[in-house]
Image (tube, rainbow, N blue to C red):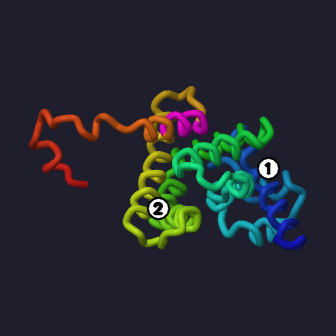
Amino acid sequence: MGLRERKKQRTRAELQRHALRLFRDHGYAATTVDDIAAAAEVSRSTFFRYFPTKEDVVLFDDVDPAMERVAAGLVPGTPLLEAVRTIVREGFGSLDDEARALEEVRMELARSVPEIAAILRERNSFGVEQIAGMVSRAVGRPADDPDVVLFAGVICGTRLAAVARVHADGTRSYVDELDRMLAHLAAGIPLADAPITRPGDPARSPA
């Protein structure tokens, strides 16, 4: 990444941090783009150069670069699921306390704001494709390999399950819960082999 792109990335991340602080303190609906621009000391037009909409400031993932740095340092031969857990733990662990707290705010907004949740549902297939691309490069198999696509789908599903658990509990950390879910996945899911006690139920809800 060149110097210009790094500066753009820093500006985008700083805009998001100001936005997430405002969303946390005043609520998503009550915070305007003008509020965010004023807090970041930039113009409204500058905000829109980096984020097309207010929703996009939540959807931007500033943790990706940290995770990419961890991924680049993994030892060849590391089992794939162990590598995913390491990337999640160390990627989030490299953030400062406020950045981790704001990431929790971002995940809660992604779950609780209907318009953001709708965009995430629309982009879900892209999430699978993105993870499949990273997995394919890591293991040297095509991105459309059935095993690669299945693994990517399982990881996406695990993330959704972690979000659901955090929402149901109200006190859990998303990062900690995701790590627990991945550990559970690595150990195997006994429920997959459990006998069906009410055989009619799966047929009535194939989705």
Range of the magenta residues?
174-181
Residue with the mark numbered 1: 18
Q: Which secondary structure type mostly characterizes the magenta part of the structure?
A: helix
- Residue 159, position in %: x, y? 50, 47
Image side of residue 13 versus residue 144, left or right: right
Note whether residue 26 is visible: no
The amino acid type of the residue labelled 2 equals Asn
Q: Amino acid at mark 1?
A: His
Seen at 75% across and 68% down, the residue is 50
Residue 193 location (% of width, % of height):
24, 38
| Residue pictured at 35% horizontal, 37% vertical | 189
SS under mark 2:
helix
Which quarter of the figure is the C terminus placed in?
bottom left
Q: Quadrant of residue 64?
A: bottom right
Name the disc covering residue 101, or none.
none
Q: Is residue 32 magenta?
A: no
